[in-house]
Structure formats: C-alpha cells, structure tokens
Image: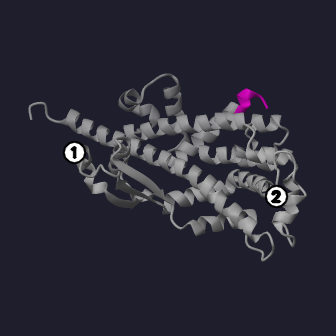
Amino acid sequence: MTGRENNGQTTTAVIRTIARELGVSESQVTATVNLLDEGNTVPFIARYRKEVTGGLDDAQLRTLETRLTYLRELEDRKATVLAAIEEQGKLTDELRDLILGCETKARLEDLYLPFKSTRRTKATIAREAGLEPLVESLLGDCTTDPAELAASYITEGFDDAKAVLTGARAIVLEEISTDADLVGEVRERFYTTGAMTAGVVEGKQNSAEAQKYRDYFEFSEPFTALPSHRILALLRGESEGVLQLTLDPGEDAIYQGMIADARGLEPQGDAADKFRAECVRFGWRTKLQISSGVDVRMRLKEKADAGAVDVFARNLRDLLLAAPAG
C-alpha cells in the first residue's frame, strides 16, 4: 500500500468519525476540512462559506477543527507506533488491529508501553540476571518457601534471597504497569469515581493571600463534578502555596483487586501468597496510582482550560453584540 492510499483511507476514517460525533453529513465535514486545509480561518468560514459547509455554525466549526487536529495527530502517532513495533519484529495482526482501532491517544500509548525503548530498569536488570524462571515459579502453584527458592538464584547484584525476591517483584511490577487493558481500566475508574480534596497548607490559614481560598480549606468533590472555574481556583491556590491538593481514588482494595484479577495474582493458599500480595500492593501504590493521578490532573486541566475559553467567548460575544449607545 502506498503512502497516498494510506493517507486517503486515514482521511476517510477521520471524516467519518467527526461526522458521527457532530451529527452532520460526511460531505459537510469534507467541505469544511478542505476549506481549513486551504488556510481559511473558522470565523471566515462561519461568516462567508455557509453555503459550502451546509450551514455549520461557529461552535460546530471550532469543534470540528479541534477534533480534526487531534485525530490527525492520532493517525500520525499510530503510524509511528506501528513502524516502531514492526521494526522490533513484534507486530502481530491482532496488535495491528488494536492499534488501528484506537480512538484516543491514551489508549494508543497504553498499547505501546511494552514496546517502548527505555533505559535499563530494575526489571531489565533482574531479567538479565535470569530471574524470570523464579517469577514463573512464584506465580504458579508454589509449595516451596519463596526465600528458599530465591536462594538458588543468588548472583552478582542480587547478593541474598531478599534482593532476589525484590528483583522478581520488579519484573512483576513492570508487567503490571505495561498491561494496556489494566492501565486503561484503572485510569478510567480513578477519574470517574475519585475525588479532589483540598486543605490549607500548614501555617497559611491566617495569611492575607489565603483568604480568597478559604472555601477550599476543607474541600472535597468528585472529579467529574468539578466545574472548570473551581478546578482553576484549586490549581491556582496550589501554585501559590496556599492549598494542598490530593487526588483521592477511593478504596485501595478495589484497585488492588483489579490488578490481582488481571494479572493472576489472587491468593491461592500457597507459600507465595505474601509475594503476590506485595506485588499487587506495590503495583498499585508505586505504578498505577501515580500514572493515573498524572492523567487525571491533565484531564482536569484540559477541562478547565476549555471551560475558561467558552466563558470568555460567551462574554466577548455579548460585549460585541451589545448596542453601541446602550
């Protein structure tokens, strides 16, 4: 397949997606994309090219332009990811279909995680030391004490059984953090069920700059319920050193259960149950909770910025449409 053919198919997929999201015809989207690609601005198109776009208003055009940029970047990233994985000789038909079917950048990056070229991690060093067979033994039907099993894997860099078990755990943690489906499920649950909590920084409650944030000294609200202006206020209070923000995901046990179910780390009543439980706990606390928290902050910031732009646009529109003489 040539690059020209591939680009054509990609453009068709992008247009179909935007048309479905906006509830308009593909021909309207195609005509608008052509106008944008010719260098026309949204205000110009909204005012002077209604007959070409089929009457799309400025709000629809703004959304179309934003989604067009996002989806084109997504398609470009898909091509880069596919090429990188194929170069490693690890691209299967199933993986190709999953990548091509991605609708978000986050999902695409989740799938790419296991194939990224990264620095040598603790898990990499443990694998090089030959600890993977130990991991398989510990996660299988383990009837021998893990410390006893680990003793036979002592080598340079892993000088005792404790160090060996730590290395084996690092391998499991990396597998947890690169499980695309698990990472995506945890991230979505974190955002949809978690809450933002805020409190005043110690010693700041009586300061003059803190008074405008007094409503947030003891504050908690679900992420999905936070309006854009409140998100901006909370982030501003944090940046000014007045507020301390915490992302509360909810019950740790729920996330740990998700990890255990996804990776086969449930208790089995054998000698390695403690090792599995440690992997689950560390996998949540040191990997998925942190990465999900970063994603939530990013999503909240994007939501706040979009809301701020909408408010500004409405205010400006009212100002421009006001009668000049009052």
Residue at the far bottom in the pictured view: 269
Q: Which mark is residue 161?
A: 2
Residue at the far left in the pictured view: 325
Which residue occupies 86% across, 65% down? 148
- The kind of residue tagged 1 is Ala
Image spot of residue 323 (x, y percent): 14, 34
- Nearer to me, 288 or 321: 288
Residue pointed to by mark 1: 208
- The residues colored magenta run 1-6
- Nearer to me, 167 or 32: 167
Q: Could you say whether the residue bearing mark 1 is in a helix, strand or loop?
A: helix
Is the N terminus in the top left, top right, bottom left or bottom right quadrant? top right
- Residue 5 counted in the magenta span: yes
Question: How many neighbours does mark 1 have within 10 angstroms: few (below 14), some (14-19), or many (20 or more)?
Answer: few
- Name the mark nearer the viewer: 1 or 2: 2
Magenta segment, prevailing SS (helix, strand or loop): helix
Mark 2 or mark 1, which is nearer the start of the sequence? 2
The relative height of residue 74 versus residue 43 in the rendered view (above or below) is: below
Q: Could you say whether the residue bearing mark 2 is in a helix, strand or loop?
A: helix
- Nearer to me, 49 or 243: 243
Which residue occupies 64% across, 37% down? 75
- The kind of residue tagged 2 is Ala
Question: How many neighbours does mark 2 have within 10 angstroms: few (below 14), some (14-19), or many (20 or more)?
Answer: some
Is the C terminus in the top left, top right, bottom left or bottom right quadrant? top left
Residue at the far right in the pictured view: 152
Which residue occupies 36% across, 53% down? 227
Image spot of residue 85 (x, y percent): 78, 39
Which residue occupies 84% across, 67% down? 140
Q: Which mark is residue 255?
A: none
Q: For the image shown, how many numbered marks are present on the structure?
A: 2
